[in-house]
Image: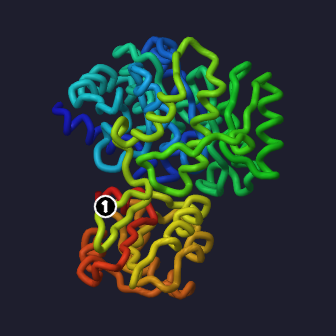
Amino acid sequence: MTYKESINWLFNQLPVFQNIGAAAYKEDLTNTLLLTKHLNHPEKNFKSIHVAGTNGKGSTSSMIASVFIEAGYKVGLYTSPHLKDFRERITINGKKISKNYIHQFILNHKSFFEKTELSFFEMTVGLAYQYFSNKKVDIAIIEVGMGGRLDATNSIRPLLSVITNIGKDHTQFLGDTLEKIAFEKAGIIKQNIPVIIGEYTSQTKPVFIEVAKKNNSEIYFAQDENHPDYPSELLGDYQIKNKKTVIEVFRNLKSDFKITEDDIKKGILNVVQNTHLQGRWQILQENPKVICDTAHNAHGLEMVMNQLKKETYNQLHIVLGVVNDKDLDTILPLFPKNAKYYFCKPKNERGLNVSTLQEKAKLYQLIGNTHISVSKAYKAAYSESSEKDVIFIGGSNFVVSEII
C-alpha cells in the first residue's frame, strides 16, 4: 500500500464530511474513546488549547499557534478542512505531517479502523494526537471539526477552551436556534478549565454562563475587553474580533509558558508566515484585484460582503459556488446586486448544481452565466475584467481551494 493508496483508502473507505456531509456525522464519542484507548491515550502526553466556534476558529487557532511559535515553542496545530493537501490539517511549527508518518499510521491501525468502523474525522483526530505525542510538542492547538459536545476532538483536557462566536451553520446537526448551537459548542467547556468566549449575543451569553457555572469554569468575554488591534497578515475586517479573542487567551493562560506582549504582537502579525493559513480575505493579485475568502455561511459572509463594499472598482465580478446543504435564502441576499456573477460548482460530491444556483440567485437579482468548473468561471471573470475591476471568489472552501 503506497502513501497515495493509504490516503485514498482514508478518504474512500469511510464517510468524509468534507465530501458527503450528513452521512459522515457521528452522534457520540464512543468510537473516539475506543480509538484513544487503542492508541494508549496519546492526547494525555501534550498540553493543549481547544478552539470551537461557527466562524473564525481556523484563524484564531492559527494565531494562537503563531504566538507560541514566536515565543520559541514546538507547536502542534490541528485544523480542518484542508484546502489543497490533507497534510495541512496536522502541522508542527508550520511544517506539514510527513507522508510516511500517515502511511505507517494507517498500515499499523487499518484493521482496528475497519473493525470499529471509524469515520474519516475520528481517524484523523487519532493521527493528530499520535503525531503530536510522538513528536513531543510543547503544546497543541486543536480546532473542533463541527459543534463541540460530540466532536471527536472533545476527548482532550485542555489548558483553556475557546469559543469564537455562534452563527447558524450545520443546523441539521447542531440545532436551528442560536441557543441550541451555543449549547453544542459549549460542550467543550470542561470541569475547572477556564473558557474564553470571543463574541456573544443576548441569546448565547446565558447558555455559556450556565454551562461554565455547572463546570466550575472561569469564563472570560473577549468582546468586553479593550485590547489593542495589532496588525496582521490576515487582512479581513472580521479578524479584529479574532485578534481580541487571541489576546484574551494569553491574558488568561495560567501555565508555565513564557509569553511576552512582543510574542503576541509578532504572532498575530506573522500568522500566515508561521502557519501557512490561506483563504482568509486573501489578495491573490492586484490590477485587477483578485480576492478570495472561504466564508460560507450567513454569519461569515455578511462580514466579508461588508468589507467588499469598501473596495473601489469600475466593475465587481463574483465567482460563486456553494455546497448543497447551505440555506441559500439566508446567503444570497447578502451578495451585491451590482456585480457580474460567474456561477460554478466545486469539484465535490456536495457541490450544488450550477443551474440550481443560477436560478435561485436570479430571485435575488444576482445575474450571471454558468460555467462548467471553478477554473473556467475564474478564467471568464478574469478575461472580462479591466485593471480597475475587482474579482471576488468565494461561497465555499472548495471553490477557493480550486483557485489558490
Say above or below: 292 vs 63: below
Instruction: Residue 329: give x, y in percent of width and height.
Output: 61, 74
Q: Is residue 141 visible?
A: yes
Q: Could you say which is closer to the camera, residue 127 or residue 341?
A: 341
Q: Residue at x 46, y 65 (%)?
A: 395
Instruction: Residue 378: give x, y in percent of width and height.
Output: 29, 72
Instruction: Residue 89: give x, y in percent of width and height.
Output: 38, 37
Q: Can residue 118 be seen in this view?
A: no
Please indicate whether residue 203 sits to the left or right of residue 108 in the image.
Answer: right
Specify the farthest residue to the left. Answer: 2
Q: Could you say which is closer to the camera, residue 148 or residue 158?
A: 158
Within 10 Å of disc 1 (Cα), the crowding (few <14, some 14-19, many 20+) is some
Say above or below: 244 vs 373: above
Location of the C terminus (image quadrant): bottom left
Say above or below: 62 vs 381: above
Location of the N terminus (image quadrant): top left
Q: Which residue is drawn at 40% across and 70% down?
A: 392
Q: Which residue is drawn at 56% across and 68% down?
A: 306
Please indicate whether residue 109 sits to the left or right of residue 334 in the image.
Answer: left
Q: Which amino acid does label 1 sit on?
A: Leu
Looking at the rendered structure, the secondary structure element under dot 1 is strand
Quadrant in the picture for residue 302: bottom right
So how many labels did they put on this image? 1
Question: Which residue does the numbered mark 1 point to in the structure image?
Answer: 284
Quadrant in the picture for residue 80: top left
Instruction: Residue 31: give x, y in percent of width and height.
Output: 52, 28
Q: Residue at x 20, y 38 (%)?
A: 5
Colour scheme employed for the rendering of this structure? rainbow
